[in-house]
Amino acid sequence: MSLVSFAQPAVAPLPAHLVDAAVRAALAEDLGLAGDITTNATVPAAARAHAVLAARTSGTVAGLQLAAAAFALLDPATRFEPIVADGAGVAPGRAIARIEGNARALLSAERVALNFMGRMSGIATLTRAFVDCVAGTRAAIVDTRKTTPGLRAFEKYAVRCGGGQNHRTGLFDAVLIKDNHIVAAGGIGAAIERARAHAGHMVKIEVEVDTLAQLAIALTYKIDAVLLDNMTVAQLAEAVRIVGGRCLTEASGGVSLQTLRAIAETGVDLISVGALTHSAPVLDLGLDFQAAETRDAAVH
């Protein structure tokens, strides 16, 4: 185990077994059959190093657990000292963590650690921008299933680090009746009735509607939420009025930072944004080894 002392995170930590499995797979992909041939050829096996993980641009941090795991799996004696917690905002040049361990291990795990953290921090950063944009309204920002295959748990965790909320995790934990379900089932009513008969009492049911006429039909059945798909701001406001608090209202489609505030001000409860996970730019992070005479200097 690495020697890690995490600051209190903004959200509950990720399950350790998910972190371990993902990081092991990423290291196996990078190291292959021969390992890090560059590092093994140039760095003495017993060499030790001190490094600083720092932000190169401003953003919101996410993924410290995965970075720590990457170094620990190659050198269990690695000392990983986070300076900020996941969910914290950082400015360019801000130190995020200090790391001490076997030099070969730090070099070989560097890209895996940065790939996970850069991706997750980018999602957290974009999410924070959306969350800040709706401040003062009732709307919560939620993600979608438009995630990188195999990385959904981590990307949805990053959304939480940015102040957003998670929609359903997968196809298994909530019913979301969409337009194709409605066509295949023979109508909104048939789809809702079959879903209600099939789902357990703990499973919520949401229905996607494209028009106010469809909304009126959906509201004649027992549903927990309605997804208002690609509606105009005026239609969203009218939909909220029609629902009148009988279920949650979710706006989806055509959402950007330019349109977001007007959508939030219609009074919807949720705004789902696929871009949080499918289009977030990676946050630029760097890992730099520190010479003995500079390693104890403050990083600002």
Image (cartoon, rainbow, N blue to C red):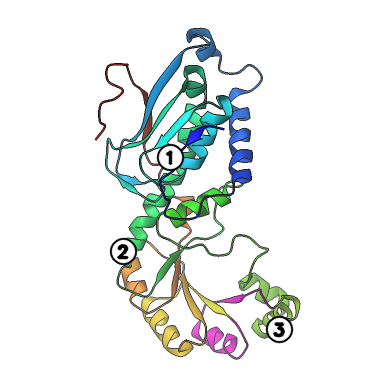
Residue 193 is tagged as: 3
Residue displayed at 62% across by 75% down: 204
Q: Is residue 280 visible?
A: no
Q: Quadrant of the N terminus?
A: top right
- Assess whether mark 3 and mark 2 are in contact (beta carbons under 8 angstroms): no
**Is 110 one of the magenta-colored residues?**
no
Kind of element beneath mark 1:
helix
Query: Under tag 2, what secondary structure?
Result: helix
Residue 265 appears in the figure:
yes
Q: Which x, y percent locates residue 241?
A: 42, 88
Residue 118 got which mark? 1
Amino acid type at circle 1 is Gly
On screen, residue 65 above or below 239: above
In terms of sequence position, does the residue under pointer 1 or pointer 2 come before the other?
1
> What span is in magenta?
201-223
Residue 179 lies, in percent from the top left, at 61, 73
What number of labels is visible? 3
